[in-house]
Image: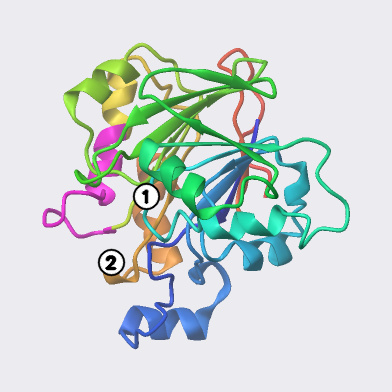
């Protein structure tokens, strides 16, 4: 399984749209891996996780063919993950060659209800599917299971477990704070071969509990290894960084690397293999 992080920033991007803080100024100067667009991911070029407002930039930057998508999964309805109205450009008003078949779109009930009212479903070739927590759907040879995130009590927020035909299994854990026990209990029934985990708060412990910080991500890895759900040599990669954390990419690497965790950046691709395979994870 090939996992590509198309964007790795928090809601406001990095540098922030209107921010002149030290971290944003450094990112504008240093550029490279310090420039982060809104978070989304792509699995094997066909399974898309989230559709942020930066999607066109990501398509152009990474030469993506969104017509190759077999399914789109939304984690939740916050604007930085859910730019749902962009799907209107699938309609015959904007495409000269229609898609060969409608695009299946999955997500929490609030997201799907919005799309039902916002899109002209007579012209936009999508099928809309409400996901239920813990219930697996099978699409295009993948098994995708939503689990409850700890993020926004006013709406349903999912993280996802994605498993391919060979059994390679990745947890996409963004957005979320520290999981409630019901989610930890569910994760004990899985054997994960890779993890993408948000690290919005960087070095900032405490405070807003709907996101994770560096110490949370480290605890998460140790907990899953101790409970037999994750092996120590499997890839764990961070995403969804906020400039408010203040640390640049190399500073994050210096802290996370010794903990066995890779610092994600826009455009990073890594491989996830089932535990029966010993191949190298990273294919930058």
Quarter residue 42 falls in:
top right
- The residue shown at (37%, 18%) is 229
- The residue shown at (51%, 80%) is 30
Above or below, comparing residue 87 to residue 228 in the picture: below
Residue 37 percent location from the top left of the image: 51, 66
Q: Residue furthest front?
A: 122
Residue 67 percent location from the top left of the image: 77, 47
Question: In the figure, is residue 98 to the left or right of 167?
Answer: right
Question: In the figure, is residue 202 to the left or right of 172?
Answer: left
Above or below, comparing residue 186 to residue 120 in the picture: above
State which region is magenta: 201-220
Mark 1, mark 2: which one is toward the viewer? 2
Is residue 253 something that shows in the picture? yes
Residue 112 percent location from the top left of the image: 46, 41
Asked which secondary structure carries label 2, the reply is helix
Question: In the figure, is residue 202 to the left or right of 262?
Answer: left
Q: Main secondary structure of the magenta part?
A: loop
Residue 4 percent location from the top left of the image: 62, 46
**Crowding near the residue tagged with mark 2, few <14, some 14–19, many ≥20 C-alpha atoms within 10 Å:** some
Above or below, comparing residue 77 to residue 167 in the picture: below
Is residue 265 something that shows in the picture? no
- The residue shown at (77%, 59%) is 63
Q: Which residue is mark 2?
A: 245
- The residue shown at (70%, 66%) is 61
Q: Which residue is mark 1?
A: 256
Quarter residue 240 falls in:
bottom left
Marked residue nearer the N-terminal end (1 or 2):
2
Residue sitting nearer the eye, 17 or 114: 114
Q: Is residue 207 magenta?
A: yes
Asked which secondary structure carries label 1, the reply is helix
């Amino acid at each position: 399984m090939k996992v590509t992080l198309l964007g790795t920033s928090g809601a406001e991007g990095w540098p922030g749209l209107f921010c002149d803080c030290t971290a944003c100024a450094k990112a504008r100067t240093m550029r490279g891996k310090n420039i982060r667009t809104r978070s989304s991911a792509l699995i094997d070029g066909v399974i898309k996780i989230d559709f942020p407002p930066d999607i066109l930039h990501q398509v152009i930057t990474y030469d993506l063919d969104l017509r190759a998508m077999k399914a789109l999964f939304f984690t939740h309805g916050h604007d930085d993950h859910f730019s749902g109205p962009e799907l209107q450009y699938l309609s015959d008003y904007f495409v000269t060659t229609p898609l060969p078949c409608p695009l299946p779109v999955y997500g929490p009930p609030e997201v799907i209800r919005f799309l039902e009212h916002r899109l002209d479903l007579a012209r936009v070739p999508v099928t809309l599917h409400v996901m239920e927590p813990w219930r697996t759907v099978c699409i295009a040879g993948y098994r995708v299971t939503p689990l409850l995130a700890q993020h926004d009590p006013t709406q349903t927020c999912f993280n996802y477990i994605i498993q391919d035909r060979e059994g390679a299994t990745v947890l996409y854990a963004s957005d979320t704070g520290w999981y409630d026990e019901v989610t930890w209990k569910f994760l004990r029934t899985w054997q994960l071969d890779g993890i993408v985990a948000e690290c919005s708060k960087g070095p900032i412990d405490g405070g807003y509990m709907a996101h994770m910080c560096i110490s949370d991500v480290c605890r998460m890895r140790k907990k899953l290894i101790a409970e037999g759900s994750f092996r120590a040599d499997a890839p764990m990669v961070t995403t969804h960084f906020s400039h408010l954390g203040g640390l640049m990419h190399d500073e994050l690497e210096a802290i996370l690397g010794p903990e066995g965790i890779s610092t994600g950046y826009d455009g990073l691709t890594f491989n996830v293999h089932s535990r029966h395979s010993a191949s190298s994870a990273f294919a930058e």
